[in-house]
Image (cartoon, rainbow, N blue to C red):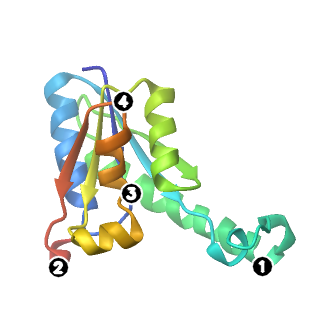
Amino acid sequence: MKKILAAIDFSNATSGVLKMAGEMAKAFGAELHLLHVIEPEPTYTAYGFTPEEFPAIQTFHGETRVRAQKTLDDAIKLVSGPGLKPIGHLGDGGALHVLSDKAEELKADLVVLGSHGHGIVAALLLGSVAEGMVRKSKVPTLVVPAGDPKQG
């Protein structure tokens, strides 16, 4: 195993994903990539508009990217250690699509992501990135259950 891609969404699932992916990368001597996806704002995409048509949304998206990059950098520092220097990536778009594409682009040997445990009804109504990766990915996928929200 040479490359592990961990998807992090900065939710209560993130700490478990970071821990598991970090431990696996160390054990296998693998390169660890951390990916956070910024999903598009439905206020314009749902109606076929582009971000360029709404300058305020562009400003919001820019600020979102800055904050996401800082949080991603913090996650990298948290996991970094002797023999492990994760590489961070920010993506834009639908989480499942961006994650699948990044796994292919990197030629990842494993994808690690979290499950929020919302249940089958939420997965049916909202969709689930974890379920989508397990069903559609060509890359082996490890789903880490979300931890206690109070523990981060």
Question: In the displayed structure, would residue 38 be above or below residue 108?
Answer: below
Q: What's the distance in space between the residues labelled 1 and 2, CA to CA?
A: 34 Å
Mark with earlier residue (1, 2): 1
Q: Amino acid at mark 4?
A: Lys
Mark with earlier residue (3, 4): 3
Q: Position of residue 7 (x, y in %)?
A: 36, 49
Q: Nearer the viewer, mark 1 or mark 3?
A: 1
Q: Nearer the viewer, mark 3 or mark 4?
A: 4
Q: Which residue is mark 1?
A: 56
Q: Position of residue 70 (x, y in %)?
A: 49, 60
Q: What's the distance in space between the residues labelled 4 and 2, CA to CA?
A: 34 Å
Q: Position of residue 28 (x, y in %)?
A: 18, 23
Q: Residue at x 43, y 33 (%)?
A: 103
Q: Amino acid at mark 1?
A: Ala
Q: What's the distance in space between the residues labelled 1 and 3, CA to CA?
A: 27 Å
Q: Are circles 1 and 3 on residues that touch, CB within 8 Å?
A: no
> On the rendered structure, is 10 left or right of 18?
right
Q: Residue at x 28, y 59 (%)?
A: 14
Mark with earlier residue (4, 2): 4
Q: Are circles 3 and 2 on residues that touch, CB within 8 Å?
A: no
> On the rendered structure, is 106 left or right of 130?
right
Q: Amino acid at mark 2?
A: Lys
Mark number displayed over residue 74: 3
Write down the quadrant of residue 72 in the picture.
bottom left
Question: In the displayed structure, would residue 1 be above or below residue 130?
Answer: above
Mark with earlier residue (1, 3): 1
